[in-house]
Amino acid sequence: MKKYLKDMVITQVEFLRDDYVLLSLSDPSGEMPECLPGQFVQLAVEGEPKVMLRRPISINWCDAGTNRLDLLIHLVGPGTRALARLRQGDTLSTLFPLGNGFTIHTAGDILLVGGGVGTAPMLQYGKALLKAGARPHFLLGGRSAKDILQLERFRELGEVSVTTEDATLGERGFVTQHSILGAKHFDAAAACGPKPMMRAVALWARQAGVPCEVSLENMMACGLGACLCCVEKTVRGNVCVCTEGPVFPTTELTWF
């Protein structure tokens, strides 16, 4: 897939929480490329002397028809905090779309599991599945209700189940403890979030005989496979997550 380096214009800045910001971007040329669910962007961070490298961010929503690209950013360091200081009308150097995406199923019930900022790519994935003819079911997890972001947007695309560790929303516990896993058959599953969560989902899927994909969040610098800092061990040997992934079938990973 062709990659683009574009100066995108910020059309909206929305803080979903003190440490989460949703940036909406548009292409001033009006030629927004199509993006696959699970792909990511590399953003230049300007005006922050401590940050030299671009920051990788999952694509939360991409719609070429409306010229809209949404990025959900968790503010964890000087780079992401600098991005959160951008305002409507500012430009942002964006390299995208990068990596390989999730499988687009054309039928069946597909379970999409997200935790923390790992929920971000699941919104775009759900939209793509619904358009293709499949039925997305979202399973979102967090420590408490305030960790479940964009809930209404997920509900517009499919059924939503929630777990929180303190039971302030949905069922108490972790995502792999939700009752839906034993009550409903799924034809495929996908997960993104903390690695322990993804490993637990992968183990459930293996035991249930459900094909599963995960989106890895290894540290990245270049996003193009040159720096080798995002290498992951697989059954095929060591590969760069930014170019071979970030989405992998769990059967390719050495997790079991």
Image: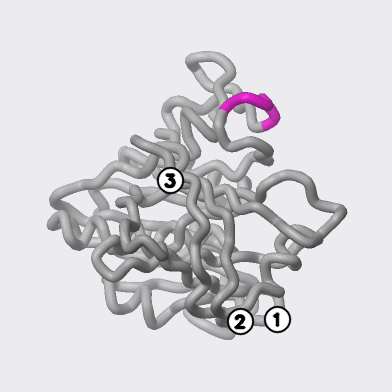
Rate crowding at label 1 as few (under 14), some (14 to 19) or many (20 or more) other CA atoms within 10 Å: few
Amino acid type, label 3: Pro
Query: Residue at point 62% right, 24% down?
Result: 226
| Mark 2 or 3, closer to the camera | 3
Pointer 2 local density, CA inside 10 Å: few below 14, some 14–19, many at least 20: few
- In the displayed structure, would residue 67 be above or below residue 213? below
Residue 251 is at least partly visible in this image: yes
Q: Locate residue 148, reporting x and y percent.
A: 53, 76
- Taking the spot 65% from the left edge, 50% from the top edge, the residue there is 55
* Frontmost residue, 175 versus 114: 114
Residue identifier under label 2: 15
178 relative position to 238: left or right: left
Residue receiving disc 1: 18
Which residue has dot 3 on it? 97
Tally of marks? 3
Q: CA distance from mark 2 to mark 3?
A: 24 Å
In the displayed structure image, the side of residue 63 where residue 135 appears, left or right: left
Foreground pick, 215 / 67: 67
Q: Main secondary structure of the magenta part?
A: loop
Quadrant including the C terminus: top right
Give the extent of the magenta segment.
225-229
Quarter-of-image position of residue 133: bottom left
Q: Contact (CB < 8 A) between labels 2 and 1?
A: yes
The percent position of residue 141, horizontal first and vertical second, equals 53, 67
CA separation in Å, label 3 and label 1: 28 Å
Q: Which mark is residue 231?
A: none
Label 1 sits on a secondary structure element that is: loop
Which type of secondary structure does the marked residue at label 2 adopt?
strand
Of the image marks 2 and 3, the number of the one nearer the N terminus? 2
Q: Position of residue 129 (x, y in %)?
A: 23, 56
Q: Which color mode does the image show?
A: one colour
